Amino acid sequence: MKIHSEGPLTDRVAVVTGVSRRAGIGFALARDLLAAGARVLVQSWTPHDAEQPWGADEIEDVIEALGGRSPQLDHLAADFADPDAPRQVVERAMTTFGAVDVLVANHARSALGRLDEVTAADLDLCWAVNARASVLLAQAYAAAHDDRRPGGRIVLFTSGQHLAPMSRELPYAISKGAIHQMTLSLADALADRGITVNAVNPGPVDTGWADEELTASVGRALPAGRWGTPDDVARLIRWLASDDSAWITGQVLNSEGGFRRWVM
């Protein structure tokens, strides 16, 4: 199914990481950016999903659901535990499309672990995949981006760890906290080049990972009576990738639908 069309991002090239499940946020982001006219390189690493309770999709089915490989869409599997992988992803976009304008670092490694359970290996891997790879992606993007092209954008993804404790998943929360804190400094590093850097906390999003009890509990704490959807996130990312967001940089945006944590 062809989903590419003329839109506000026509002639822009976007890299979207973490596109490995059709129910996931990354899939919705890529689909929305394609519909807005962008050419998109998507990155995936399905072995991580295969380790999780929600399981992995066949990546070729994911790519086909986005319209299939075409002059608008390319894909690269890359493991961000490898410190060279971020550079490889950006270089693939440059090789395929000749430019990179928008970077959306949506990928994440999930990891449970309370203080008495957490291990150095868990901490190191979450740090490498979530935080280190986000910095190295920004670095590779900065090296590749042509500042004569308009609309330089980097969008990072944090979580709600700055709004409430996440003591059951310390490796994940700590790595996401690092992304939160790096946003302003990365924005300052690139501001003189006209490149904006922002981060998004998407709040509770229904991507099929929560069990029935958690789904109900969180649902009661959301005024709309429902979890966020990947499309809710995609609309915000499309705006951040567009010219309309040019005056916003160095910000961490909480897009949570009024989530009342104290109700849970």
Image (cartoon, rainbow, N blue to C red):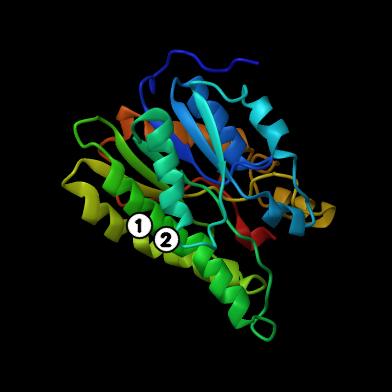
Examine the rendered structure and indicate whether residue 23 appears above or below residue 79: above
Q: Position of residue 123 (x, y in %)?
A: 57, 75
| The C terminus - image quarter | bottom right
- Residue occupying the point 52% across, 17% down: 4
| The N terminus - image quarter | top right
The answer to whether marks 2 and 1 mark residues whose Cβ atoms lie closer than 8 Å is yes
Left or right of 236 on screen, residue 225 = right
Instruction: Name the residue type under label 1.
Output: Thr
Check disc 1 and report the residue beneath it: 183
Instruction: Name the residue type under label 2.
Output: His
- Residue occupying the point 37% across, 36% down: 94
Q: CA distance from mark 2 to mark 1?
A: 6 Å
Mark 2 neighbour density, 10 Å: few (under 14) some (14–19) many (20 or more): many
- Residue occupying the point 61% across, 78% down: 121
**Residue that sits furthest to the left in the current view:** 192
Q: Secondary structure at mark 2?
A: helix
In the depicted view, which residue is nearer to us: 220 or 125?
125
> Can residue 253 be spotted in the picture?
no
Left or right of 159 on screen, residue 9 = left
Q: Position of residue 155 (x, y in %)?
A: 41, 45
Q: Give the quadrant of residue 145.
A: top left
Q: Secondary structure at mark 1?
A: helix
Check disc 2 and report the residue beneath it: 180
> How many badges with numbers are in the image?
2
Mark 1 neighbour density, 10 Å: few (under 14) some (14–19) many (20 or more): many
**Residue that sits furthest to the right in the current view:** 212
Q: Position of residue 131 (x, y in %)?
A: 46, 63
